[in-house]
Amino acid sequence: MKYLTEFRDGAAARRLADDIARTVTRPWALMEVCGGQTHSIIRNGIDQLLPPQVELIHGPGCPVCVTSLELIDKALAIAAQPGVIFCSFGDMLRVPGSQSDLFRIKSEGGDVRVVYSPLDAVQLARANPQRQVVFFGIGFETTAPANAMAVHVARKEGLTNFSMLASHVLVPPALEAIMSAPTCRVNAFLAAGHVCSVMGFWQYPPIASRWRVPIVITGFEPLDLLEGIRRAVRQLEAGQATVENAYERAVTFDGNRVAQALLEEVFEPSDRAWRGIGVILQSGWRLRDDYRAFDAEARFAVEGVTAPESPMCRAGEVLQGSLKPNQCEAFGTACTPRTPLGATMVSSEGACAAYYHAGRFHQLARAGGVLAGTGS
Amino acid sequence: MASTLEPVATIDPSAWVCPLPLRDYPAIVIGHGGGGVLSAELVEHVFLPAFGNAALDALGDAAVLPLAGAEATGRLAFTTDSFVVRPLFFPGGCVGDLAINGTVNDLAMRGARPKWLSAGFILEEGLPMATLGAIVQRMAAAARAAGVQIVAGDTKVVERGHGDGCYINTSGIGVIDAGVEIGPSRARPGDVVLVSGSIGDHGMAIMSVREGLSFESAIVSDCQPLHGLVDAVLSAVPPGAVRVLRDPTRGGLAASLTEIAQASQVGIALDEARIPVHGPVASACELLGLDPMHVANEGKAVAIVDAAAADAALSAMRAHPAGREAARIGVVTAEHPRMLVSRTAIGATRVVAPALGEQLPRIC
C-alpha cells in the first residue's frame, strides 16, 4: 500500500525510538488525543519501543467512547420505533446503553443498518419515501463534514423522511478541559492528525501558550506517531511549548476551508456531555435553526430521555491522565471488557480496555522471549 | 503506558476477550453467527450440553467416526454446514460453490477424502427459477471438480419475506486413510505454522458488494476445494507430521489459530510480515478499520506441521494450484499457552484476540 507501508518500516522506527531515548532526560507524560492513534499504538506495539521515561496517556478521542449514555439511550428509543430505518457507523452498534444496545434492538425487529457514509443514509431515505430514515451522526471534526453534507443534501432535495441524531464533539474544548483539571499530568499533546486535516491547526497556538503545553499534530502510522513523540519530547526537554505539524502530508495550518464553511453553515457550537467526563461547555455541535427540522431528537420526541452514568466509574480521571486505569477500584473486577461500567472500557480504543489489553502484553513479556523462535 | 505499567494481578489472560459487551443476550443476535467468541459460546453452552459425545466433543471441522466390524481399521469423517450468504452471487462464486467447497474443505481438514454429500434447500417463495437453476449448475460443476457425488437431498419452501432467496445445507462424508491423524488438539511446541495462501479475500469480496457498504474493488472470493492440496501435502511428508489443519472461514485466521492454541494448550506466535495479504484486501481493510486476520476465507488452509517436515509441506503446497502463495507464518510455542501473539511490522508484539461477533467497520 503506497503511502502506508513506507510509514511502517521497522528499521526507521527503531532509529526514531533511539533518537527519543537519546533526547529524554526525565519522565514525561504525552497524551495522544485520537482513538485512532491509540488503536495504532496498541496494534503496532509502538509503546514497547519507547524509553521508560516516556509515558503515553490515551486521550478522550474515541467518538464511540465519549458519546453519552443518554444519547445512546435516545438512539435506542428511536431505533426501536416501527417504520424507522436507523443507520449508524458499524462500531456504534456494540456500545451498550442503560438497558440494551443496537444489536439487541435489531434482534427484536428494529431495522438497524450499518452504513459507511452518511450519504448512504440519504440514499436510503430517497429509496424508502414511506419510511423515516435516521442517521446517528457521531464523531469529532473528522466525520462532521460528511454528516453536515448529508443534512445539507437532504434539505436541498426536500427529503422529509431523513433526520440526524447529532452528537458531534470537538477537540480544542476537550484539550482545555483536560489542562484545566487540577490533577492534570499531561505534559504534551499529540494532536489528532485527521481532525486537523479538516480544521487545520489555527485553533491550537492559544492553547499551547495559555497552558505552556507543546502540541504536535501527529499522524497514525508507526513512523508518524514516533515522529510526533520525538518532536514533543524535544520541545519538553528544551522547555518549549509551541504548535508543530508532524503530519505535513495531510495537514495545513488553514485546513479544509470548504469543509469548515459547510460545518459553519449546518452546525452551531453547543454544550455537550462526554461519557465518563461530564458536560464540557461549547464542546459539541448541534444543528442550526435552519436545519433543526432534520434533528431526530425533536422529530421523535426523545429529548426527555436521561440516563445516569455508573457512580463507580472514574473514567473522567483516567481520560485526564490523573488516574491510571489499574488504580481504579473497579478495574479488572467490577469493570472488565465483558462488563464495562464506563465508556473507556467499552471500545478497544478506550483507555481502560487498552490498558486491560496491555496487561496481557506485560504478562507475556514477563514470560520472556515470547517471539524468540518465530524467525522461521 | 509503555514501561510504566505495573503488573496487574487481577487479569486472567485466558478469560480475556475482545472488549465488546454483548454477553448476556436473551435472543440470538447476528454476532452469534460470526464465527467468533459468541459463536463459540453458543456451541459450548447450548449445543454441547445437549448433544455432546466423543465424536462431537473434539470440535473438529468434521467428526471422525470409527467403523466397527470387518472394516475396523477404516474411519469416516462426517460434517455439515449451512450457507446463508447475501448476495447469492458475488465476485468469484455463489452460494452453490460455497455449499460444495465449504463441506468438502471441512472433510479435508481432518485428512479425509471427500466422497458423498447431501444437499438441503430452503427456498423463499418468489425466488426466480433461473436463479435457482444457475445456483444448481454451479453446485454440480463444483461437485464434479471436487470429485464428490450429491447422493441425498431435500427442498422446503418458506413464505416470501421469511428467507433470503436460497439457503443451502450440505452434509458430507469422507474416508480417512489408515495412519492419518489430524485434529485441533495435536499441535506441539516447536511445530511450524503454514498458510496455503493470501488471507481475507472472501470476506472482503462479500463486503465489497453488500448493501450499505459497497465499494469499487477487484477483490474476488478465494472459494475453492482444498482436498487436493491436503492430499499433496500428506503425500509429501511422513505419517503424523501434519498435526492440525483448519480452513479459516468465519472468524478468519485469528479464530482458527486461537481455537487450535486452546484445544492443544499451546501458544502460537506469528510473524505478521510473513502473512500473505493481497494489496486490494489490505487496502480495503485499512479503509474500513478491519484486521485481515479476522476476515473470512473460503479456500485457504492453515496447517500446523512438524518442523522437520515443514519445508516439504510448504513445497507441496506451493506446487499445487490452490497453494501457490503458501507461506510459513509462525511457530507453536510453550510460552503464552492458549494465546495467539503476533510480531508487528515494527518488531513489537501484540495479542491477537478472536472477534466477539460480526466484523464491524470502525469509525476512527
Image (cartoon, helix red, strand yellow):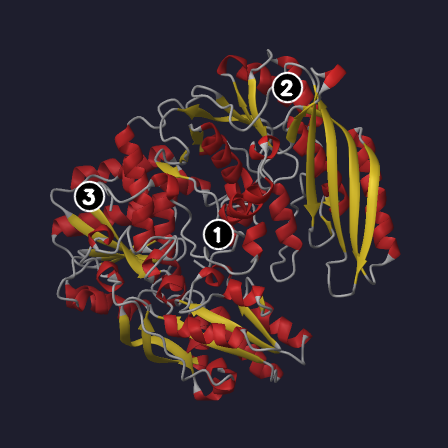
User: Image quarter for residue A203?
Assistant: bottom left
Q: Reading the chain from its start, which is encountered first: label 2 or label 3? A: 3
Amino acid type shown at disc 2 = Val
Mark 3 residue element? loop
Q: Is residue B75 left or right of residue B132?
A: left
Q: Residue at x 42, y 48 (%)?
A: B18
Q: Reading the chain from its start, which is encountered first: label 2 or label 1? A: 2
Residue wearing tag 1: B289
Marks 2 and 1 on same chain: yes
| Residue B141 visible, this orientation | yes
Residue wearing tag 3: B4
Q: In this view, does B163 lie to the left or right of B307?
A: right
| Residue A202 visible, this orientation | no
Whether pointer 2 and pointer 3 mark residues with C-beta atoms closer than 8 Å, the reply is no
* Of the two numbered discs 3 and 1 in the rendering, the one whose residue sits closer to the viewer: 3
Q: A215 or B9, which lies in front?
A: B9
Q: In this view, does A229 lie above or below B195?
A: below
Image coordinates of residue A94 in percent, x first then y, are: 46, 60
Residue wearing tag 2: B233
Q: Reading the chain from its start, which is encountered first: label 3 or label 1? A: 3
